[in-house]
Image: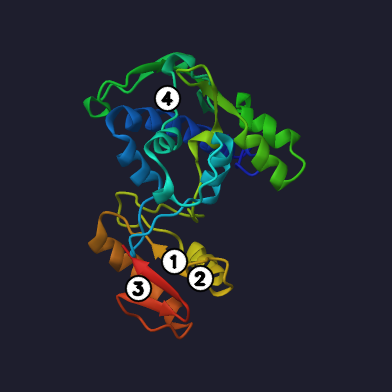
Amino acid sequence: MDEIYLHLTGDIHAIAAANNLLAAAVDTRIFHESTKSDKALLNRLCPPNKEGKRSFSDIMFRHLKKLGISKTKPDELNPREVKKLARRDINPASITWRRVIDVNDRFLRKITVGRDPEEKGTVSETRFDISVASEIMAVLALTTSLADMRERLGKMVISNSKAGDPVSADDLGVGGTPVLVHAGPFANIAHGNSSIVADKIALKLVRQGISQDGLKLVELGIAVQKACENVTQPLMKFLCSLDISITEEINTGNSKVIWF
């Protein structure tokens, strides 16, 4: 099979990953809304920075506009506005967004999710569709530009609220800081880390001012002792070749590389 299909001839894997990320966001939203107060939800959406100040992300401004809220700072919201912003009140029975997989596995046509006790009773039935049946695939095929694709993806309806209003992907606020996921960061293995290629790209972007805060995070695997031995040695050689001083926090001019 690998002689025929080397994963270089299509976007199916990217489509499946994006589709299932949205499906996970739907279930996660239902879980958190059923277990947390309005204030706690707002704290997750708009966490304070080191100075204790909160701010809205760009994608949240889109939702605020949809809600008819013109305020620009989280601390300016009244309790009614906090509830409108923090909650989607998704009706689980109305969810139309399914997970997808690029395998013809008939036993995944109907499944039950959320059975772990940690999910606190958020059990529901769903199913897997074939990856190419995802609406994201249709958007990708019909889009005319990056901006057009962003608009179309945001308008995808995933369910209704308990009041009967449509809930879109934009309403969930899936988005944020760009991440380079190359190799296996956070994996529970000794080499669970980002690749040097990804580190090079990130450092270059930071130097060019694309990263607003000038910060690059390097995440190592849980088996940290072996990870440090396998990863930091070749990466340190690369950083030293750039005349970067090696400290606990590696300063690169206006940028930092922080290990965690």
| Number of callouts | 4
- Residue holding disc 3: 233
- Residue holding disc 2: 203
- Mark 3 and mark 4 lie on one chain; the one further toward the N terminus is 4
- Mark 4 and mark 1 lie on one chain; the one further toward the N terminus is 4
C-alpha separation, residue under disc 1 versus residue under disc 3: 18 Å
Quarter of the image for the N terminus: give it.
top right
Q: Position of residue 61 (x, y in %)?
A: 55, 46
What's the residue type where badge 3 is placed?
Answer: Gln
* Numbered disc in front, either 1 or 3: 1
| Numbered tag placed on residue 216 in the rendering | 1
Which quarter of the figure has residue 82?
A: top left
What's the residue type where badge 4 is placed?
Answer: Asp
- Residue holding disc 4: 89
- Mark 2 and mark 4 lie on one chain; the one further toward the N terminus is 4
How crowded is the residue under tag 1: few (<14 C-alpha within 10 Å), some, or many (20+)?
many
Q: Nearer the viewer, residue 221 or 126?
A: 126
* Position of 190 relative to 150 (above/below): below
* Position of 174 relative to 232 (above/below): above
The residue at the point 32 percent across, 23 percent down is: 114
Q: Position of residue 219 (x, y in %)?
A: 36, 59
C-alpha separation, residue under disc 4 versus residue under disc 1: 36 Å
Quarter of the image for the C terminus: give it.
bottom left
